[in-house]
Amino acid sequence: QVQLVESGGGLVQPGGSLRLACTASGRTSSRTAMAWFRQGPGKEREIVTAISGIGSTYYTDSVKGRFTISRDNAKNTLYLQMNSLKPEDMAVYYCAARDYSNAFYSTRGRDYTYWGQGTQVTVSS
């Protein structure tokens, strides 16, 4: 089992920045693919970004150039640096992990086995 705990959400003005963190515990592996998803009010959950076990990344078009995914394997922590935030980025953000040592990322939520509880990001002036 893997437990994921997100932190770092909050209220930010448009154009501002936030950094989300997702700390993993339990049966973790630095080679496991992980991702950030989000679900805005009245919207379906969507992929934001993902990182493979070897560090290759995926970004949905709407966040390219503004968001950066990274991981610190020594700390078992996944990060999401969000810059130039827009009101449409407002959502609950979830981190997700694939099965142990599955290094390939996916853009489909159903391919991820472990999920955090989510952290709210509010972008408003």
Image (spheres, rainbow, N blue to C red):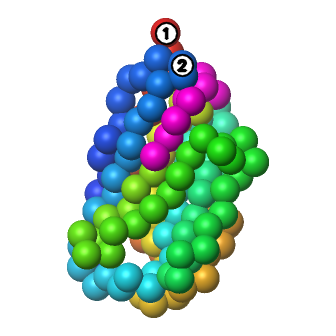
Q: Is residue 7 above or below residue 69?
A: above
**What residue is drawn where x is 52% and y is 35%?**
83
Q: Is 107 situated left or right of 97 in this image?
A: right
Magenta span of residues? 81-88
Mark 2 or 1 closer to N-term?
A: 2
- The location of residue 22, given as percent across then percent down, is 34, 58
Furthest residue toward bottom: 101
- Magenta residue check for 61: no
Structural crowding at the residue carrying mark 2, measured as other residues with C-alpha within 10 Å and reported as few (<14), some (14–19) or many (≥20): some
Q: Can the viewer see residue 94 in this picture?
A: no
Q: Is residue 98 above or below residue 17?
A: below
The residue pinned by badge 2 equals 14
Q: Is 59 situated left or right of 50 in this image?
A: right
Q: Is residue 82 above or below residue 21?
A: above
The type of residue carrying mark 1 is: Ser
Structural crowding at the residue carrying mark 1, measured as other residues with C-alpha within 10 Å and reported as few (<14), some (14–19) or many (≥20): few
- Magenta residue check for 84: yes
- The location of residue 52, given as percent across then percent down, is 56, 77
**What residue is drawn where x is 29% and y is 71%?**
76
Tally of numbered tags: 2
**What residue is drawn where x is 32% and y is 41%?**
8
Q: Is 12 situated left or right of 5 in this image?
A: right
Of 66 and 34, which appears nearest the observer?
66
Give the CA separation, mark 2 to mark 1: 6 Å
- The location of residue 93, given as percent across then percent down, is 47, 45
The residue pinned by badge 1 equals 125
